[in-house]
Image (spheres, coloured by chain):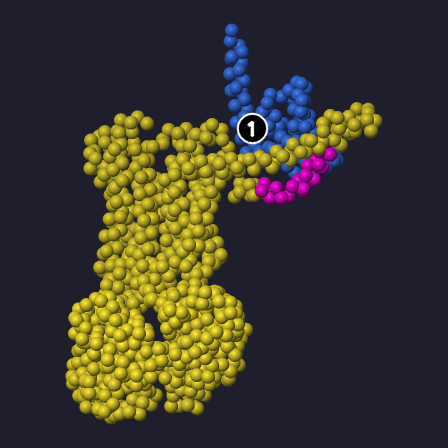
C-alpha cells in the first residue's frame, strides 16, 4: 500500500522535523551557491557575487519557515478536514452510523466481557495470589470411579512432609455459620483452612495477622478467626480496633486476629467468604464429627504450589509415589486411593466445575457474535459504498484526487471503528462483573462473587479484528473509485438488476455466513431450552409438589444431642399440628441441598467384594414418615417407624440399585449390613430417586433412622398444600415459641431446591439466549441491509416490471423470494455446522440428543420468521416505486 | 511578501513546475531557470515561493526528490515527475487551456 506508506511517512515527518530541516537548509544553500557561481562567472568578485545571490534568493530563513509550515500543515489540515467531513457523513446517515457502531460495540463488548469472565474465573481467579501460574488444584481419586474426592487431613500432612517438588500445599473447606453481631444475625460463609493458608497464598491481612503454624493443630485448641474486608466493613462498621475482639462462631468464642485484604474472597470460586478459621477448629464447625486424625474422612479440598520449573507431570509422578506408600502403610483406609493435580481451571469443586463448560461454550458463542457483527458492518459499509459510488464519481469528475478520496474514506472508517471500540470497551467494563447478575440462583446470606478481569490482550484483539474488518470494507468504495469509468458510472446509477453483479455476490456471502452462524446459536439455545424443560419435567423419584423443606441451625446455636432430641420431638409435634400440614419428617440432608451425605465403608453379610473393591455407599439419616412425606415409594417391606429408636433393633432401608447390586435375585428384606461397627437389618426397599442432581446415575444408597443414628443438625421435610411462605411464617412462630434465639433457614419448596441444582444449565441458557438473540438481531439487520440495497439499486428494473404490468404482489414476492433464498442457503449450511458443533455441548444437555429435531426445527422456524420480517420492509418499499420516475432516471 | 508586480497568475506555479520537469529531473535553480527561459524572460519565479511549492508537490506525490550531482559537480536535490504528477500535469494543462480559451472568447467579444 504505497499510499498508506506515504501517509505514514508524512506522519513520521512530523517527528523527523529536524532531519528534514537540515536537508532543506542544505538544498537552499546549494541554490545560493549555484547563484553565486553564476555571478562570479558573470564577472563579479566572490564577496559581491555571494551578496547578490542572497539578495536574489530573498530571505532564507523566512522561506524555510514557509516551506516547513506548508509541509506540516498540508497533511494536518487535510486530516482534520477528513475527520470533520467523516463526522459529518456519519451524522448525515445516522441510521447507518448507529447501526454500524452498535454492531461493532456489541461484538467487541461481549467478547471482551466473556473473556474477562474466563480470565477472572478460570485462568487467574485470585487477583491477590502471587504465582497463580504455579498453583494447581489437588484432590483425591478412587480406583474404579472418575469421581473426585476431597483429601484426608492426615494425608495432607504426609504430602507436606514427603514431597520435594512442591513449594506448599493448602487445604480449604467451605463451612457456614450464623454470624450474630449486635441484633443482626445472618448466614455467613467461611473456610476451614490449613494454618499456612495466607502465607502460602502470599495474601497479607490488612490488619492483624494470618494463622501461625501451631494454630492448625490440636483439637479445637485455637479459636481464632480472620475475617474478610467486606465483613469487617459491613458487620463491624470498619472498627479499627477489631483485632483482639471476640465473636461467637458456632457456639465457640473466637478471637478475631486479622482482616483479609479487600479483594481477597477466599479460594472457593463463586462464593465470597466472610471468615476463615484454622483446621484445628474443624470439629466446632462440622456437625459430622472430628476428622483431623481420620484417614478415611476425605473432606477437605486442596491446592498446591509447584516449585518453579517443575512440570505438572513430574509433580503428579511424585504424588503417585506418595500415594503408593500411603496405600502400603494404611491399607485399610488408603487402598485404591490416590491424588491428582489439575490446572486451576479444571478445579473439580466449586463454581469452576459448574461454569467451565458453560464458559467454554459462551466463548465460542461470543466469537460467533463478533464475526456476525463484523460481517454486518462490512455489509453496511459495502452497501453504502455502492450508494456512495455516485458521490465518488462526481467528486472525481470535479477534479478531486483519488488519493485524497481514499484518505477520506480511510478516516471515515477509522472514525467509525474508533467510536465503536471505545463503546465496546465501555460495554466490556460494565459487563465484566455481570455474570453474577445473570446467575439464576440467589441464596440469602451468601454473596456470590465471580471475579471478572478485563484483559487488555483480549480487548486489543477484539478491537483489532473490528477495526481491521471495518477498514477493509471502508476502503472498498475507494478501490472501486480507482477504476470507475466516470461517464458510465454517472449514467448507469440505479439501474442494476435484482441479484446481479459480483459485488452483490460478496454481500450475499456475508449475509449467508451471518444466517448460518445465527442458526447455529439458535439451535444451541433451543437444545439448552429443551434440556432445561426435560430436566424440569423429569421425575427426580420424589414428589416436588406440595413439599416444603427447611432447617434450623441447632449446631451453631450450641445444642447438645440430648437437648436437640427434645427440641426436634417438640417442633415436629407442633409442625404436624399446623393447619394444612399432612406430614412432616426429619432428614439430616435435604435432597438436592448443598449438604453432603454421610458415606461409610460397609460390610454386607454374604457378599464377598473383589480384591480391590472397597464396599461403600452414601446414606442419609431420616426420621419416621420420611418416605411418605417426601413421596418416595417403598417397593418392598416397610418405612421407618417411631419405634425404630435407641431401644429398637438397628434397621435400614436400601434403594433398588443397592438391593439389586448386593442381593441379586434375592429378597433384600431381612438381610444385614454393617455400618460403623453396627449391624443393621434391612426392613425396606425404596424406589430409586435422585439425591443430588438430576444428572446423576443410579447409585447404591441407603437410609438409616435418625433416632438410632442421631446428629444435631437436621432438616425438615413438610408435606402441605400451603405455600412455602405460609409454612415459613408458621414455622418461624413455632420455633420461636420453643427457643426465641432460633429461626428457620432456607425455607423453600422442594421444587425450588431442585431447580437450584440445574444452575449451570440455566446460566448457559440465559447466556446463550442473550447471545443468540443478539446474533439473530444482527443477522436480521444484515439481511435487511442487503435487500434494501438491492431494491434501491434495481429501482429501474422494478419500475420496468411494474410498467409492464407486474402487481405489488409480484414485486413483493420477487424481493422476498430473494431474501428467502439467501436465508435458506444460510440455514442449510448453519444446520450442517450445528450438527457437528452441538456435540460439544456434551454434559450441558440432559436427555436431549445434540441433534434433537425439535430444537433444529424451532431454530429453522425462528430464523425463517426473522428473515421474512427483515425482507418485508424492503419488499414493501419496492411496491411503492413510482414506475414513471423510476424509468425516467 | 509585498508583490508590486505578480509574476505569475495565482495558482499556476505548480503547473509550471510540473511542466518544467516534464522531460528530465532538475534541481530547484534549474527549474526556475527553465521557466524563465521558456517564457522568454516573461515569467520570473520568485525563489521564496519556489521551495514551498516544491515541498507541496512532493507531499502530494506528484514529484519525488533525490540527491544528485549538478553539472558543475555540486550536490543538489533533483526533482522528478511521478506518473501521478504526469497525469496531474495533463489535467491542469487541459483545465488551463479551457479557461484561457473561455477568457479569450470573453475578451474577444465586442
Left-right relation of A620 to A243 = left
In front: A810, or A124?
A: A124
**Residues shaded magenta:** A10-31
Is A801 above or below relative to A650? above
Q: Is residue A537 visible?
A: no
Give the SS element for disc 1: helix
Q: Which residue, given by chain and number where applicable, does mark 1 sit on?
A: B89
Res A848 → quadrant: bottom left
Residue at 26%, 29% (x, y): give it. A882
> x and y percent of residue B21 in the render?
62, 30
User: What letter labels the chain drawn in blue?
Assistant: B
Is A480 above or below relative to A169? above
> x and y percent of residue A611 in the render?
33, 90
Q: Is residue A368 visible?
A: yes
> Callout 1: few (<14), some (14-19), or many (20+) C-alpha neighbours within 10 Å?
many
User: What letter labels the chain drawn in yellow?
Assistant: A
Quadrant where the C terminus of chain A sits is top left
Is A270 above or below relative to A555? above
Amino acid at each position: 500500500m504505497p499510499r498508506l506508506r506515504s501517509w505514514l511517512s508524512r506522519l513520521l515527518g512530523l517527528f523527523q522535523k529536524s532531519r528534514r530541516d537540515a536537508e532543506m537548509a542544505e538544498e537552499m544553500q546549494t541554490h545560493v551557491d549555484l547563484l553565486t557561481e553564476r555571478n562570479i562567472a558573470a564577472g563579479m568578485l566572490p564577496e559581491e557575487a555571494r551578496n547578490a545571490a542572497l539578495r536574489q534568493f530573498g530571505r532564507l530563513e523566512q522561506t524555510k519557515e514557509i516551506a516547513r509550515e506548508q509541509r506540516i500543515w498540508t497533511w494536518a489540515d487535510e486530516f482534520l478536514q477528513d475527520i470533520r467531513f467523516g463526522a459529518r457523513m456519519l451524522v448525515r446517515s445516522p441510521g447507518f452510523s448507529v447501526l454500524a457502531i452498535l454492531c461493532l460495540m456489541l461484538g467487541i463488548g461481549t467478547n471482551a466481557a466473556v473473556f474477562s469472565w474466563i480470565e477472572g474465573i478460570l485462568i487467574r481467579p485470585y487477583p491477590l495470589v502471587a504465582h497463580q501460574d504455579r498453583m494447581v488444584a489437588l484432590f483425591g481419586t478412587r480406583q474404579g470411579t472418575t469421581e473426585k474426592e476431597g483429601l484426608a487431613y492426615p494425608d495432607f500432612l504426609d504430602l507436606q512432609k514427603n514431597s520435594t517438588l512442591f513449594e506448599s500445599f493448602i487445604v480449604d473447606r467451605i463451612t457456614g455459620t450464623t454470624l450474630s453481631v449486635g441484633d443482626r444475625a445472618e448466614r455467613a460463609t467461611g473456610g476451614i483452612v490449613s494454618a499456612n493458608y495466607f502465607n502460602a497464598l502470599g495474601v497479607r491481612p490488612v490488619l492483624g495477622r494470618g494463622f501461625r503454624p501451631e494454630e492448625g493443630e490440636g483439637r479445637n485448641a485455637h479459636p481464632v478467626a480472620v475475617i474478610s474486608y467486606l465483613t469487617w466493613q459491613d458487620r463491624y462498621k470498619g472498627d479499627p480496633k477489631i483485632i483482639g475482639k471476640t465473636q461467637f462462631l458456632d457456639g465457640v468464642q473466637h478471637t478475631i486476629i486479622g482482616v483479609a485484604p479487600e479483594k481477597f474472597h477466599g479460594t472457593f470460586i463463586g462464593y465470597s467468604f466472610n471468615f476463615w478459621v484454622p483446621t484445628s477448629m474443624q470439629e466446632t464447625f462440622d456437625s459430622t464429627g472430628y476428622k483431623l486424625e481420620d484417614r478415611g474422612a476425605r473432606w477437605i479440598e486442596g491446592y498446591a504450589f509447584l516449585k518453579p520449573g517443575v512440570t505438572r507431570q513430574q509433580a503428579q509422578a511424585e504424588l503417585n509415589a506418595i500415594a503408593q506408600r500411603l496405600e502400603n502403610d494404611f491399607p485399610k483406609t488408603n487402598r485404591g486411593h490416590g491424588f491428582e493435580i489439575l490446572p486451576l481451571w479444571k478445579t473439580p469443586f466449586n463454581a469452576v466445575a459448574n461454569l467451565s463448560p458453560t464458559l467454554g461454550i459462551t466463548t465460542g458463542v461470543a466469537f460467533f457474535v463478533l464475526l456476525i457483527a463484523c460481517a454486518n458492518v462490512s455489509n453496511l459499509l459495502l452497501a453504502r459504498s455502492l450508494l456512495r459510488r455516485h458521490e465518488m464519481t462526481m467528486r472525481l469528475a470535479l477534479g478531486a484526487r483519488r488519493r485524497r478520496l481514499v484518505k477520506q474514506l480511510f478516516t471515515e472508517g477509522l472514525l467509525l471503528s474508533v467510536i465503536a471500540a471505545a463503546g465496546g470497551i465501555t460495554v466490556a467494563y460494565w459487563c465484566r462483573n455481570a455474570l453474577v447478575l445473570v446467575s439464576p440462583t440467589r441464596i440469602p446470606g451468601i454473596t456470590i462473587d465471580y471475579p471478572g478481569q478485563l484483559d487488555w490482550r483480549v480487548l486489543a484483539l477484539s478491537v483489532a479484528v473490528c477495526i481491521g474488518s471495518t477498514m477493509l470494507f471502508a476502503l472498498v468504495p475507494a478501490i472501486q473509485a480507482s477504476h470507475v469509468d466516470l461517464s458510465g458510472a454517472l449514467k448507469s446509477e440505479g439501474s442494476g438488476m435484482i441479484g446481479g453483479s459480483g459485488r452483490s455476490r460478496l454481500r450475499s456471502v456475508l449475509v449467508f455466513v451471518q444466517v448460518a452462524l445465527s442458526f447455529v446459536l439458535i439451535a444451541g439455545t433451543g437444545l439448552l431450552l429443551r434440556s432445561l424443560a426435560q430436566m424440569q419435567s423429569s421425575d427426580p423419584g420424589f414428589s416436588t409438589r406440595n413439599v416444603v423443606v427447611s432447617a434450623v441451625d441447632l449446631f451453631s446455636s450450641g445444642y447438645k444431642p440430648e437437648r436437640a432430641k427434645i427440641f426436634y420431638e417438640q417442633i415436629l409435634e407442633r409442625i404436624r399440628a399446623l393447619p394444612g400440614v399432612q406430614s412432616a419428617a426429619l432428614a439430616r440432608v435435604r435432597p438436592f441441598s448443598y449438604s453432603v451425605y454421610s458415606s461409610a465403608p460397609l460390610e454386607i453379610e454374604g457378599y464377598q467384594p473383589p480384591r480391590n473393591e472397597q464396599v461403600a455407599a452414601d446414606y442419609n439419616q431420616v426420621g419416621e414418615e420420611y418416605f411418605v412425606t417426601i413421596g418416595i415409594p417403598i417397593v418392598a417391606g416397610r418405612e421407618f417407624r417411631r419405634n425404630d429408636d435407641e431401644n429398637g433393633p438397628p434397621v435400614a432401608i436400601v434403594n433398588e440399585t443397592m438391593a439389586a447390586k448386593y442381593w441379586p435375585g434375592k429378597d433384600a428384606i431381612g438381610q444385614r449390613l454393617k455400618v460403623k461397627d453396627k449391624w443393621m437389618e434391612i426392613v425396606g426397599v425404596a424406589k430409586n430417586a435422585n439425591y443430588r442432581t438430576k444428572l446423576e446415575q443410579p447409585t447404591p444408597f441407603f437410609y438409616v433412622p435418625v433416632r438410632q443414628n442421631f446428629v444435631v443438625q437436621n432438616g425438615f421435610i413438610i408435606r402441605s398444600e400451603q405455600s412455602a411462605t405460609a409454612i415459613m411464617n408458621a414455622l418461624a412462630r413455632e420455633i420461636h415459641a420453643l427457643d426465641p434465639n432460633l429461626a428457620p433457614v432456607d425455607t423453600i419448596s422442594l421444587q425450588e431446591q431442585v431447580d437450584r441444582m440445574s444452575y449451570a444449565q440455566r446460566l448457559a441458557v440465559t447466556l446463550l439466549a442473550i447471545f443468540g438473540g443478539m446474533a439473530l438481531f444482527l443477522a436480521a439487520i444484515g439481511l435487511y441491509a442487503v435487500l434494501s440495497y438491492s431494491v434501491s439499486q434495481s429501482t429501474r428494473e422494478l419500475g420496468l416490471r411494474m410498467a409492464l404490468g407486474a402487481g405489488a404482489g409480484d414485486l413483493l414476492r420477487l424481493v422476498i423470494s430473494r431474501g428467502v433464498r439467501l436465508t435458506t442457503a444460510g440455514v442449510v449450511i448453519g444446520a450442517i455446522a450445528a450438527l457437528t458443533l452441538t456435540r460439544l455441548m456434551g454434559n450441558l444437555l440432559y436427555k436431549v440428543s445434540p441433534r434433537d429435531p425439535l430444537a433444529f426445527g424451532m431454530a429453522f422456524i425462528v430464523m425463517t420468521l426473522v428473515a421474512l420480517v427483515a425482507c418485508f420492509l424492503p419488499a414493501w418499499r419496492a411496491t411503492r416505486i413510482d414506475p414513471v420516475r423510476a424509468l425516467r432516471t | 511578501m509585498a508583490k508590486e508586480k505578480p509574476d505569475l497568475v495565482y495558482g499556476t506555479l505548480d503547473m509550471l513546475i510540473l511542466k518544467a520537469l516534464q522531460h528530465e529531473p532538475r534541481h530547484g535553480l534549474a527549474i526556475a531557470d527553465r521557466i524563465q527561459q521558456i517564457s522568454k524572460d516573461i515569467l520570473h519565479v520568485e525563489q521564496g515561493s519556489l521551495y514551498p511549492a516544491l515541498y507541496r508537490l512532493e507531499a502530494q506525490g506528484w514529484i519525488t526528490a533525490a540527491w544528485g550531482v549538478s553539472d558543475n559537480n555540486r550536490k543538489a536535490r533533483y526533482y522528478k515527475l511521478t506518473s501521478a504528477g504526469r497525469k496531474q500535469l495533463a489535467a491542469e494543462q487541459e483545465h488551463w487551456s479551457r479557461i484561457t480559451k473561455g477568457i479569450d472568447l470573453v475578451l474577444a467579444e465586442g
